[in-house]
Image (cartoon, helix red, strand yellow):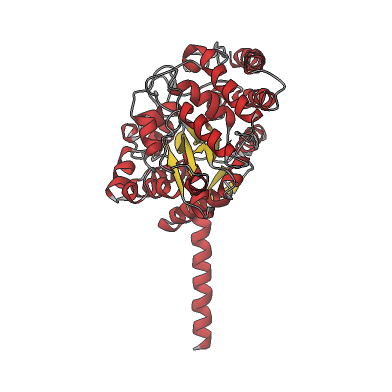
Amino acid sequence: MKHAISILAVSAVLGSAQSAMAQTEIEFWHAFTGRLGELLAEQVDTFNSSQSDYSVVATHKGNYSEALNAGIAAFRAGEQPDILMVFEVGTATMMAAKGAVKPVFEVMADAGAEFDQSKYIGSVAGYYTSADGDMLSLPYNSSTPVLWVNRDMLQEAGIDPDTDLSTWEQVGTVLDQLKDSGVDCPMTTAWQSWIHLETLSAYHDVPFATKANGFEGTDTELVFNSEPQVAHISAMGEWADEGKFIYAGRRNEGGANFRAGECALFTESSAGYAGIKSESEFDFEVRPLPYWDALVDEPQNTIIGGASLWVMEGQSDEEYKGVAAFLNFLSSSEIQAKWHQDTGYLPITNEAGELTRSQGFYDENPGTDIAVIQMTAKEPTANSKGLRLGSFDQIRGIIDEELEAVWAGDKSAQEALDSAVERGNALLRRFEQASR
């Protein structure tokens, strides 16, 4: 009997090993850590457990910039992953990477997978769609800027937590009150270029760059040194000088300060929801991103941030079938609704948004639908559909440097933005030449 059991055990192990060997491995490189990394791993585990043909292996490759650079280097070495997460500002770079990318619509068609592009939210999918309407990458984690509020800090400062913060003029008044009450960090921000220049421009329907912000060609020029942008950065520069706006860093360093209860107001991605919900010990609230009442009667629409999933060339047909299956899994209503509810990222399909609403999530968590409303309430204009600019990661670095000079009081807003435009346009011209 013992011998028989031994044979059965060995057979089971061998069968399991053969099954594992039969699986096609799909490499997925991403930029998530912390709570978002945990939720991504949960999705991958769920997919892998749902079928036996494919095994997705998710690997963290650093922050967004580092992940993009790692993917480019890997392709040049012939060691590229099947799927690469690329943040939205890398879209033009990926589109120009001839021979490196296999468009999602082609992946789906070649794999014979069911793929209906019309089910994706237009203002989200449009960012990653060609002029012919074909989806180039999957808008996996799309976010938009919002205003996070520490209601407890407002209350302690003698301010009504329900006070109107819909305009920057009103925010300025509240910052005065917070500072006067002794608050050390009335407001901080994450991703200053994305929120306070890129989205600011779209929200007020003014161009960030010519040629529909790059959607109509690589011969585009930056123009974000015009009056609306200068006025906003000037106001923020004054708030920084007066200790009402505390600059914490170029990416999301300010998030730690807000989650720790140190700052009253925080402009950040809607995807800040995952970390804020899991870490904060205070009563928080999400509000719409403020707009300048002096510039517009009502705002246009915000633009997306986050990243999309690009499929790399050079893989086998079987790998592409696995990629198609995984992307369809990520797009399914149930998975997308849970992702949206867990993270604060936008649901990428209309069905996922409707499912979230029908499940009562928005009623139970007021404000969590603000990101969706900001993106979909109005039809995007040429100024507000997003940005598609070459070398934009490097251009953001220039913008960050110039904005830091404003916060430090070393440059006026006009001087800093003029310099950023001039330096950024030089990079655009080099990108244009290289793309020909």
Residue 81 occupies which quadrant of the picture?
top right
Image point 49% across, 89% down: which residue? Answer: 1
> How far across and how far down the image is residue 7, in percent?
52, 79
**Residue 187 visible in the picture:** no
**Quarter of the figure with the C terminus:** top right
> How far across and how far down the image is residue 192, in percent?
58, 30
The reply, left or right, for residue 229 in relation to residue 49 is right
Q: Residue furthest bottom?
A: 1
Please tell me whether residue 429 is drawn above or below residue 368 in the rendered image. above
**Foreground of the two, 294 or 248:** 294
> How far across and how far down the image is residue 135, in percent?
41, 29
**Foreground of the two, 339 or 110:** 339
Please tell me whether residue 1 is drawn above or below residue 196 in the rendered image. below
Residue 321 occupies which quadrant of the picture?
top left
**Foreground of the two, 427 or 344:** 344
Image point 53% across, 68% down: which residue? Answer: 14
Residue 117 occupies which quadrant of the picture?
top left
Q: Residue furthest right?
A: 410
> How far across and how far down the image is residue 99, in percent?
56, 26
The reply, left or right, for residue 372 in relation to residue 149 is left
Q: Total of numbered circles in the picture?
A: 0
**Foreground of the two, 391 or 395:** 395
Image point 40% across, 48% down: which residue? Answer: 341
Please tell me whether residue 290 is drawn above or below residue 431 in the rendered image. below
**Residue 396 visible in the picture:** yes
The reply, left or right, for residue 230 in relation to residue 329 is right
Image point 52% across, 87% down: which residue? Answer: 2
Please tell me whether residue 374 is drawn above or below residue 292 in the rendered image. below
